[in-house]
C-alpha cells in the first residue's frame, strides 16, 4: 500500500465511506500490485481459480488471503470482512465471533445470491485504521468492534446497487438488472460469472 485509509464520518443516514475507484483490471499470478490506499475496496486483482475470487469462508490468522484475490470477490458483489490481529481481533473471543459471522448472512439485495456464492470472505489484514473493516466495491465500513447486524445492513445497502435501470455496483454483476414489474413467471436468475 502507498497509504493506509483514514476513517471519515458517514453522512447522515449512510454507513461507511466511499473509497475512490482504483480500477478493476486483471493481473497475472505473481504480479506485484501496489494499492494507493488500503484496505483496497477496488483495484487490480487475480482472475485464476484458487487465487481470485477467493472461496467464501473464514480465513484464519495464518491463512493466505491476499487483496489481489479478495478484490475479485468485491468485483462480483461479494462482501469482505477484514480483521486485524495487531489491533486485537485475534483473541479467542474474536476468532469465535469471526467463525460464526456468516451464520445470519443475507442473500444479496438485487441478484439474490445466497451466502457462499461470492461472499462473505473473512480474512486477516493489518494495513487498516481499525480492528475490523467491511468492504464492498468502492465502499468501506470501519469498526472497532464486530457488529454483524451493521455489516449485514452495509452489505444489503451497498453490495449491489441499481440506478436508472443499470448496475452502479459491482462492476461485474452476477445477474441482469431486474425489471420494475416482472411479468408472471419471470424471475431474475444469477448469470455465470463473466470472469
Image (cartoon, rainbow, N blue to C red):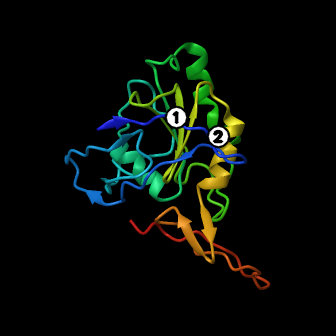
Decide which of 116, 34 is in the foreground and name it: 34
Q: Secondary structure at mark 2?
A: helix
Residue 155: x %, y % from top left? 63, 49
Check the image and report above or below for 65 versus 126.
below
Residue 145: x %, y % from top left? 62, 24
Q: Is residue 76 left or right of residue 99?
A: left
For residue 151, the mark is 2
For residue 170, the mark is none
Residue 181: x %, y % from top left? 77, 81
Residue 172: x %, y % from top left? 47, 66
Q: Give the foreground label among 2 and 1.
A: 1
Q: Is residue 98 left or right of residue 26?
A: right
Q: How dense is the environment of label 1, judged by Cα within 10 Å: few (below 14), some, or many (20 and up)?
A: some
Check the image and report above or below for 193 versus 165.
above
Q: Earlier in the sequence, mark 2 or mark 1?
A: 1
Q: Which quadrant of the figure contains the N terminus? A: top left
Q: Secondary structure at mark 1?
A: loop
* Residue at point 26%, 43% (across, down): 34
Q: Is residue 145 left or right of residue 138?
A: right
Decide which of 73, 84 is in the foreground and name it: 84
Check the image and report above or below for 158 versus 11.
below
Q: Which quadrant of the figure contains the C terminus? A: bottom left
Q: Looking at the image, which residue sits at the far bottom?
A: 183
Asked if the residue under mark 1 is in contact with the one under mark 2, i.e. CB atoms within 8 Å, the reply is: no
Q: Is residue 172 left or right of residue 99?
A: left
For residue 7, the mark is 1
Q: Is there any visible trace of residue 123 in the rendered image?
A: yes
Amino acid at each position: 500500500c502507498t497509504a493506509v485509509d483514514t476513517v471519515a464520518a458517514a453522512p447522515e443516514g449512510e454507513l461507511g465511506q466511499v473509497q475512490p475507484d482504483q480500477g478493476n483490471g486483471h493481473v497475472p499470478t505473481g504480479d506485484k500490485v501496489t494499492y494507493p490506499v488500503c484496505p483496497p475496496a477496488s483495484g487490480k486483482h487475480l482472475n485464476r481459480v484458487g487465487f481470485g475470487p477467493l472461496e467464501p469462508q473464514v480465513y484464519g490468522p495464518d491463512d493466505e488471503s491476499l487483496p489481489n484475490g479478495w478484490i475479485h470477490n468485491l468485483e462480483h458483489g461479494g462482501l469482505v470482512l477484514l480483521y486485524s490481529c495487531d489491533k486485537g481481533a485475534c483473541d479467542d473471543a474474536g476468532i469465535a465471533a469471526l467463525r460464526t459471522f456468516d451464520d445470519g448472512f443475507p442473500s444479496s439485495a438485487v441478484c439474490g445470491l445466497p451466502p457462499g456464492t461470492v461472499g462473505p470472505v473473512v480474512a486477516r489484514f493489518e494495513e487498516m485504521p481499525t480492528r475490523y473493516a467491511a468492504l464492498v466495491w468502492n465502499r468501506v465500513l470501519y469498526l472497532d468492534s464486530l457488529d454483524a447486524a451493521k455489516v449485514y445492513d452495509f452489505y444489503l445497502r451497498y453490495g449491489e446497487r441499481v440506478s436508472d435501470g443499470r448496475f452502479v455496483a459491482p462492476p461485474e454483476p452476477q445477474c441482469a438488472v431486474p425489471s420494475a414489474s416482472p411479468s408472471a413467471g419471470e424471475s431474475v436468475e444469477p448469470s455465470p460469472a463473466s470472469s
